[in-house]
Each structure stands twice: as C-alpha cells, then as structure tokens.
Image (cartoon, helix red, strand yellow):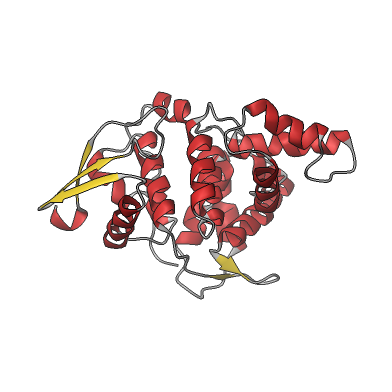
C-alpha cells in the first residue's frame, strides 16, 4: 500500500459552510446497513423530473413505489437511506448540483453519486485511505479498512457492525469503479470526467479548503486524479460551460457559480501545486 493520507477537510475547518452545503458529520452513517444504492438512485432519478421538489421524491418512492418494494415499510426505509446519502431535496446544494450533473454526464454518474455519498456518510469517508492507498491491481485488504473505521469511530460500533460497514463500503467502492472482483477485490484506477472534477472542486470549496489547496485535496484524489490531470479536466468542464476558468501564468481564476446558479460562488484564485 502506498503511503497516502487523504485530506477532505482543512485542520482549521469551520463546519458551518460545509453543513449548509449538505455535508453530514458524526460517527454513524448509512453504510451500517446499505451501500451507495447506485441502482436505486438511478431508478428514482428516472422517475422524478429534474426540477422536482423534495415532496415529489417522497411520493415517487413511497406512494408510487418506483423502486418496486414489497411493503410500505421497505419503501420508507429505502427513502430514508437515499435521503441520508443524497438528501433528495433541491434545497440542499450538494443534491442540487448532483442532479444537474447527473443529467449532463451519463458516463460520470457512478463517481458523481460516490462523491455525494462521501460528503454525506462519515463512515464511507473513513474508508477512503484503505482504498486510494492501494496501487493498481493490488488486492483489497479488509483488515486495513476495518482498522481505519475503528480508528474513526472508536468504540461506537461493535465488531459485527464494523464488519458490515466494511462489506457495504467495499461494495460501494466497487460500484464507483475503484475495485473489481467478488470474493477477492482488486484495485482499479477510475477515469473521471470533467463534470466529476467540477463536482470535486465544489466539494473542496464547500469543505473549507484554501484556494491553493483545491487541486490536491482528497476530493480530487478519490478520482485518481493528480493536480495536472485535474486542471486539464477542469478546462474540459469550462468548455462544457460548468465552470469559469482563466489562467495567467501560475495563477488560475476559478468561478463555480455555473455549477449552481441558484446560489453561485465567489471568484477564487488557485495557485497550481507545481508552481508553488
């Protein structure tokens, strides 16, 4: 395993902005019982118009049973878990941006959903080092993920629950494309799209990072994307009209308001890591 430590939040982080964006914190998460539910999310998005209010998602899952669950209780539980992971509410910026990018970028959907889940499930986030630290083709080590989880939650989860989180998290990383295999899983390198990088840059900003750190945060590294590749893909996002990006020497001016026109974002200046 490579010596990799991912930074998803700055040490002096003010969580208020992250919470306002839709981040969730704590020691409990959806992965005690479910994965990122990628297929279910896709089904719900196919059934609900992109501009729908939160109540329409509830009706689609519970009343109209778009997920084809056998009982009302399982419908409600599925709705609860999906809301934990994604909010399903356009009043939440992370969800609003996810829904917009989902309709733009079909190829990037697994990684887009995964990024949103990382921001909203602290348990899944705690497993990141155990996967991203693996070199391509390396076998996934469940004990390493379990140890990372145990260090994050201390004694708040018992042994059985920790093991369940490991199973669910490994499945989620596989759904996102980072691992393949059933009995034995092996590391794969994912190929992010410009929309994925734009979303990761937004999450880095909302998490509270200083602008010069944005291209080297954990949000970009979970896309298997170094600073140079991230910048190239960010330029691709600019060409798609998702962000505004201007470069002058070592300075990059980045505007994120195109991702979320409802609220917008302030102009930022980034210094490329190579130039520092």
Q: Kindly indicate the quadrant of the structure image that contains residue 213.
A: top left
In this view of the protein, which residue sits in the foreground, 228 or 139? 228
Q: Residue at x 52, y 55 (%)?
A: 111
Residue 181 rendering spot, x and y as whole percentages: 65, 72
Q: Is residue 156 left or right of residue 257?
A: right
The N terminus, quarter of image: bottom left
- Residue at the extreme left of the image, as rendered: 249
Res. 270 visible in picture:
yes
197 to the left or right of 104: left
Give the mark count.
0
| Left or right relative to 70: residue 272 | left
Percent x, y of residue 187? 53, 69
| Image-quadrant location for residue 75 | top right
Q: Is residue 155 visible?
A: no
Q: Nearer the viewer, residue 197 or 64?
A: 64
Which residue extends farthest right? 70
């Amino acid at each position: 395993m490579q010596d990799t430590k991912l930074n998803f939040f700055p040490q002096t982080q003010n969580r208020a902005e992250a919470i306002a964006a839709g981040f969730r914190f704590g020691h409990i998460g959806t992965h005690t019982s479910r994965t990122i539910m990628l297929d279910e999310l896709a089904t719900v998005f196919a059934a609900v118009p992109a501009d729908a209010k939160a109540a329409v998602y509830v009706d689609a899952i519970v009343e109209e049973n778009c997920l084809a669950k056998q009982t009302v209780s399982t419908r409600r539980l599925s709705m609860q878990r999906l809301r934990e992971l994604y909010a399903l509410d356009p009043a939440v910026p992370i969800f609003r941006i996810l829904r917009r990018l989902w309709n733009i970028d079909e190829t990037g959907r697994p990684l887009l959903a995964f990024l949103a889940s990382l921001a909203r499930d602290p348990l899944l986030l705690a497993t990141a080092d155990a996967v991203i630290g693996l070199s391509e083709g390396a076998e996934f080590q469940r004990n390493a993920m379990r140890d990372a989880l145990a260090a994050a939650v201390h004694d708040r989860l018992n042994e059985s629950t920790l093991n369940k989180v490991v199973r669910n998290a490994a499945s989620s990383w596989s759904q996102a494309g980072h691992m393949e295999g059933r009995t034995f899983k092996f590391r794969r390198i994912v190929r992010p799209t410009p929309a994925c990088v734009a979303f990761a840059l937004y999450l880095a900003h909302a998490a509270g990072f200083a602008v010069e750190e944005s291209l080297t945060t954990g949000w970009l590294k979970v896309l298997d994307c170094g600073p140079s590749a991230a910048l190239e893909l960010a330029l691709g996002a600019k060409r798609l009209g998702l962000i505004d990006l201007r470069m002058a020497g070592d300075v990059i001016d980045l505007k994120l308001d195109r991702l979320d026109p409802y609220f917008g974002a302030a102009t930022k200046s980034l210094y490329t890591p190579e130039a520092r």
